[in-house]
Image (cartoon, grey):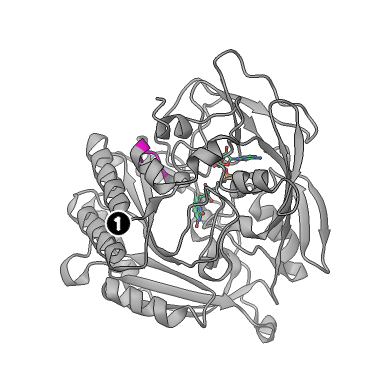
């Protein structure tokens, strides 16, 4: 029997989904059965329920994996929507091109990257993925096809970027890549002893470094609340090409089975954090371990045990209320008895996205991972959602499985305008939840 498609966090579990593989771009969409609905599905690298459709059909895109054109002179690439960021990077980096914005895993599809309008560690400089899109084709359940771009069908273009797969199926897309001299990064890591240290390093780094991100010790409290490691980097300049560090060999490492639920406890997370906090380094690095450190261990999500985990990612404004909310969120998490294994702080800038429903906005973004311990975990995450809302921030749908309908309404002021562009045959478990429809 085929496995029920899951999201990356493996929470919530939903049932009754049918996978409908899309095999060619000009294929008509299937008609969902009475009461059912459709939802495109990439590689399921969203953590919660935005890529799930309980009781409905998932239009899977892994067979839409063809490149349609690449001009090495201009860096314009056209491909089907199931092509992965990994596939693109393998094609273009040795020809002097790179993705303008990339998330922390390369195992996402172009369709998924558009629908969540993903961002990377360089949001301050370049904004989101959608900002670098030239056009794409959108297929609707009524059989209509639209090429969407900033010039053509602009409203559909803007509704679909960050549109959570609800406006129709993207079959192909064209994007503008950015120039690089080689596949290497020049990076450094600096320790900071609390949240103020992070803010100071951010201020000092944004002018000279394109990429910045921080790892935070989620168990540090008191005057060390928010201590961590600040990573900053640029693409290596041409003169470094001669001294190449060897590209990483694919480790082939995989987590073969679900860890026992208690493997991630306060003791193990404290030990890991203490060790990690001592790591400092500087130098040249291949782009893969720099951008995608987690990808070298396949199925790392299994370390959270069979109940899965809940990720919470918010952005708060760059003002006193935002910083106070960050402290409160870190403090609640540190005192919860449920340590976040991976805690990441990033800074977003004010480069606007074309997408009405795009998540990033200027401020500080905090992501925390909690092993799913049932009601205790849900209550904590609900509380973090409330703190974010009160601070004028918002939560990322791609990582979410808990935000309330009230929070969704506060976070996404364009939601009603967007709802008019949702395909009547399309839906998702997330969409029904945040619309208060079960
Ligand atoms: C380790 C890790 C690190 C991550 N780091 C980041 C990060 O730094 N920044 C960030 O922004 N995100 C990050 N993410 C989240 C990830 O980038 C997004 O969830 C991404 O959208 C997943 O793409 P996917 O192809 O797996 O799509 P899925 O998760 O399968 O689907 C995502 C959405 O896209 C829609 N969709 C998929 N294909 C199509 C299509 N052809 N047409 C229309 N809609 C479609 C789906 O309906 C769904 O709404 C991370 C995820 C992981 C696992």
Give left or right: position of 261 versus 126: left
Residue 255 in sight in this render = no
Q: Is residue 399 left or right of residue 100?
A: left
Q: Quick one: label 1, few (<14), some, or many (20+) residues within 10 Å?
A: some
Q: Residue at x 46, y 22 (%)?
A: 15
The residue most toward the front is: 417
Q: Residue at x 24, y 35 (%)?
A: 375
Q: Provide residue 326's location: percent of width, then percent of height.
A: 29, 61
> Is residue 434 positioned above or below 175 on the image?
above
Along the line of sight, the residue nearer the viewer: 255 or 53: 53
Stretch in magenta: 400-405
Front residue of 161/30: it is: 161
Residue 27 on image: x %, y %: 78, 29
Q: Is residue 7 left or right of residue 12?
A: right
Percent from the top left, x then y, of residue 218?
27, 60
Residue 203's quadrant in the figure?
bottom left
Query: Magenta segment, principal secondary structure?
Result: loop
- Label 1 residue SS: loop
Assign the C terminus to one quadrant of the image.
Answer: top left
Q: Residue furthest top?
A: 34
- Outermost bottom residue: 239
User: Is 124 above or below relative to 16?
Assistant: below
User: Which is more toward the observer, 244 or 49?
Assistant: 49
Query: Is any part of residue 201 visible from this angle?
Result: yes
Q: Nearer the viewer, residue 202 or 415?
A: 415
User: Residue 60 appears at what percent x and percent y?
Assistant: 64, 33
Q: Residue at x 65, y 62 (%)?
A: 99
| Residue 389 within the segment the image draws in magenta | no
Establish if 412 lies above or below 185. Answer: above
- What residue is shown at x 62% (from left), y 55% (from top)? 130
* Residue located beneath label 1 in the image: 391
């Amino acid at each position: 029997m085929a496995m029920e498609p899951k999201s990356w966090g493996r929470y919530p579990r939903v049932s009754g989904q049918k996978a409908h593989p899309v095999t060619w771009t000009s294929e008509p969409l299937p008609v969902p059965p009475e009461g059912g609905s459709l939802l495109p599905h990439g590689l399921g690298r969203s953590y919660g329920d935005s890529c799930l459709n309980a009781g409905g059909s998932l239009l899977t895109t892994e067979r839409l994996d063809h490149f349609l054109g690449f001009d090495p002179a201009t860096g314009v690439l056209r491909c089907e929507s199931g092509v992965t960021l990994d596939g693109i990077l393998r094609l273009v980096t040795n020809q002097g091109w790179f993705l303008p914005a990339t998330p922390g895993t390369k195992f996402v599809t172009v369709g998924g990257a558009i629908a969540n309008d993903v961002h990377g560690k360089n949001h301050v400089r370049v904004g989101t993925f959608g900002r670098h899109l030239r056009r794409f084709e959108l297929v609707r359940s009524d059989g209509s096809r639209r090429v969407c771009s900033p010039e053509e069908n602009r409203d559909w273009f803007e509704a679909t970027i960050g549109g959570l797969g609800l406006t129709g199926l993207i079959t192909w897309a064209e994007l503008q890549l950015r120039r690089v001299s080689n596949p290497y990064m020049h990076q450094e890591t600096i320790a900071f002893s609390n949240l103020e240290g992070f803010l100071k390093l951010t201020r000092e780094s944004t002018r000279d470094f394109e990429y910045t991100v921080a790892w935070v010790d989620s168990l540090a409290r008191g005057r060390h609340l928010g201590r961590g490691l600040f990573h900053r980097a640029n693409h290596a300049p041409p003169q470094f090409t001669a001294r190449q560090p060897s590209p990483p060999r694919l480790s082939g490492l995989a987590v073969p089975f679900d860890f026992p639920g208690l493997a991630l406890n306060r003791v193990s997370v404290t030990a890991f954090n203490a060790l990690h906090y001592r790591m400092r380094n500087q130098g040249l690095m291949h782009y893969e371990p720099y951008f995608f450190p987690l990808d070298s261990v396949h199925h790392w999500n299994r370390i959270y045990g069979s109940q899965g985990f809940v990720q919470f990612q918010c952005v708060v404004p760059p003002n006193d209320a935002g910083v106070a909310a960050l402290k409160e969120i870190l403090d609640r998490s540190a005192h919860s008895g449920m340590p976040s294994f991976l805690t990441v702080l990033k800074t977003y800038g004010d480069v606007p996205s074309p997408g009405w429903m795009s998540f990033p906005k200027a401020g500080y973004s905090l992501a925390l991972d909690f092993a799913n311990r049932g009601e205790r975990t849900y209550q904590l995450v609900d509380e973090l959602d409330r703190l974010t809302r009160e601070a004028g921030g918002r939560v990322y749908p791609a990582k979410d499985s808990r935000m309330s309908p009230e929070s969704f309404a506060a976070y996404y002021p364009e939601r009603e305008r967007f709802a008019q562009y949702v395909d009547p045959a399309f839906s998702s478990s997330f969409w029904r939840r945040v619309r208060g429809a079960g």
